[in-house]
Image (tube, rainbow, N blue to C red):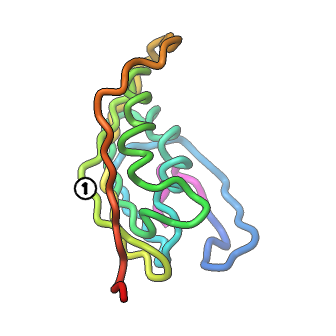
Amino acid sequence: MTLACEGDLKDAAIRSTEITLSPGCVRSGDFTVDTKTAGSVCLLIQTILPCLLYAPSRSTLLLKGGTDADFAPPVDFFRFTFLHYARLFGMGVSVERVLRGFNPKGCGEVGLSIEPLRCLTPVKITERGQITQITVSVYICGTLP
């Protein structure tokens, strides 16, 4: 398995209860990770983003799995809330593609572009600000009676 940390990953399989990761140096590149289930792509982002922010050069990710999975943040939280604040801190992360994937099959895809972080920008957020827009989105998987 190719890893962004040039490490060695053992026992990583569906239904694993224990895995072993021996990390090495962080490297940049084009990475594809497929959960082969409805496993949350946003949880994958939470694990790999901090590493790739300190990679030597730009990286791209194609993550496959559930974009709106149980017990995990939905992809729209990442796109419209997390990324807003990440950019304030100077993080160069953008979402290039979203195909929705739901339980039980997954089959969603999220493409990301990540620029290396040179330094974090201090941010002072003391005011909530004015609400300028409210958007409601509804996604339905399958058929409704």
Q: Residue at x 43, y 69 (%)?
A: 65
Q: Is residue 36 above or below residue 88?
A: below
**Residue that lies at the very extreme toward the bottom in this rendered image:** 145
User: Residue at label 1?
Assistant: 97
What secondary structure is the stretch in magenta mostly built from? loop
Q: Nearer the viewer, residue 114 or 55?
A: 114
**Residue that lies at the very extreme toward the left in this rendered image:** 96
Q: Amino acid at mark 1?
A: Arg
Q: Residue at x 36, y 26 (%)?
A: 131
Q: Residues within 10 Å of mark 1 (few under 14, many from 20)?
A: few
Left or right position of 128 against 12 = left
Q: From the top left corner, tell me how far across and down residue 106 is, in percent.
A: 43, 75
Left or right position of 76 against 120 = left
The magenta span reads 1-8
Q: Nearer the viewer, residue 67 or 141?
A: 141
Q: Residue at x 48, y 50 (%)?
A: 45
